[in-house]
Image (cartoon, rainbow, N blue to C red):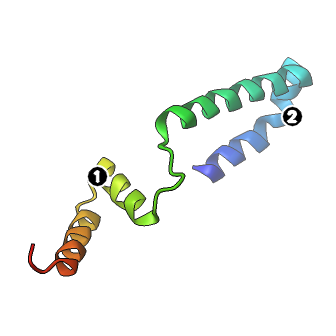
Amino acid sequence: MNRVTATIMSSTFLSVANAMSWAGFFIMMSIVCLIILGWVYVYLPETKGRPLEDMSQYFAEITGDRSILEAEELLHRSDHPSV
């Protein structure tokens, strides 16, 4: 996705900038960046202070990745044999 976006941006940059003025183009790009920043702030969880293992399990629960959840369950059982 990154390469597709970069290809589209680099191939249309000059024609779009000349069509709407350079200042207008950069204002449009700043608005796009602000929209993306808002999306990241709303939809991505805060990970500060959380161990990587917890984040792996969190994203596995969100995406429904059973392989990671099953591996975590096996690890939990091997840590606590009486459970």
- Residue at point 72% right, 24% down? 31
* Horizontal and vertical percent position of residue 65: 28, 58
Task: Point out the image quarter for the C terminus.
Answer: bottom left
Tell me whether the residue at label 2 lies in contact with that at label 1, contact meaning CB atoms closer than 8 angstroms.
Answer: no
- Crowd band around label 2 with a 10 angstrom C-alpha radius: few (<14), some (14–19), many (20+): few
Residue sitting at the far left: 82
Q: Secondary structure at mark 1?
A: helix
As drawn, the label of residue 1 is: none
27 relative to 83, above or below: above
Tell me where residue 80 appears, x and y as whole percent.
Answer: 17, 77
Closer to the chain start, of discs 2 and 1, is 2
At a point 41% along the width and 57% down the height, the residue shown is 55
Q: Residue flagged by tag 1: what amino acid is it?
A: Glu
Residue, disc 2: 14
Which picture quadrant has residue 39?
top right
Q: Residues within 10 Å of mark 1 (few under 14, many from 20)?
A: few
Circle 1 residue: 61
Identify which residue is drawn at 32% across, 56% down: 60
Q: Residue at x 65, y 53 (%)?
A: 3
Provide residue 17's location: percent of width, then percent of height: 86, 27
Three-letter residue code for mark 2:
Leu
Task: Tell me if 69 is positioned left or right of 29 in this view.
Answer: left
How far apart are labels 2 and 1 at the CA level?
44 Å
